[in-house]
Amino acid sequence: MGWLQTFERMRDDLVKTAKQYNNQQTKEAVMIACGLMAAADGRVDQTEKEKVLKLIRTSEALQVFPAADLGRLFNQYVDEAGDEFARLDLLAKVGKLRSKPDAARWVMAVAMTIARADGTIDPTEVVVARELADALGLNADDYVK
């Protein structure tokens, strides 16, 4: 299977799973994951914010949630991502999905989509991916290759 077919299958799976998990806890977890991933290098410039906000507006997987809510949450979580104590709280919120493995895998897949948006995964993004996977009770090696 080619890269494009794999990507399309992953996208279709994300859409299907997003519809299953349209709830507040999952919405927060996915926006936290996006915020942490966008802020992975210690700063989020305007182009990074615009890239994620564009994803919010155009992603079929995320269209089950109101775009305005997602944008507000993303901005809030990006701001909190740089604070060590707030970051712990964010990861704890994400960790509430540990008991919902399908939702946890979906959140992790979305986070990795953000990480791969520029075609590569930076070392700082790998660190965030491992933190997210740990919080979600997932094996990071399944996502970071």
Image: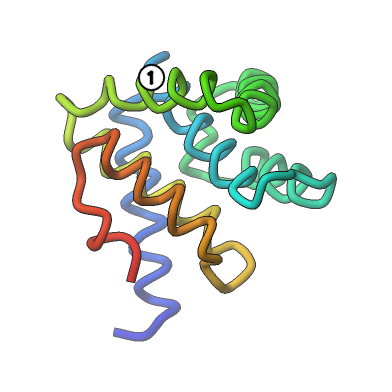
Residue at x 38%, y 19% (from the top left corner): 93
- The amino acid at mark 1 is Lys
The residue positioned farthest toward the right in the image shown = 46
The residue positioned farthest toward the front in the image shown = 84
The residue positioned farthest toward the top in the image shown = 24
| Image position of 80 with respect to 1: above or below | above
Q: Position of residue 56 (x, y in %)?
A: 63, 39
Q: How many marks?
A: 1
Residue at x 59%, y 62% (from the top left corner): 117
Residue at x 28%, y 29% (from the top left corner): 20
Q: Position of residue 52 (x, y in %)?
A: 67, 45
| Image position of 38 with respect to 6: above or below | above
Q: Position of residue 136 (x, y in %)?
A: 26, 35
> As rendered, which of 109 and 10 lies closer to the eye?
109
Q: Residues within 10 Å of mark 1 (few under 14, many from 20)?
A: some
Residue at x 37%, y 17% (from the top left corner): 25
> As rendered, which of 34 and 58 lies closer to the eye?
34
Q: Quadrant of the C terminus?
A: bottom left
> As rendered, which of 67 and 38 lies closer to the eye?
38
Q: Position of residue 12 (x, y in %)?
A: 37, 54
| Image position of 23 with respect to 15: above or below | above
Q: Quadrant of the N terminus?
A: bottom left
Instruction: Judge left or right: residue 9 versus residue 122.
Output: left
Q: Which residue is mark 1?
A: 93
> As rendered, which of 56 and 135 lies closer to the eye?
135
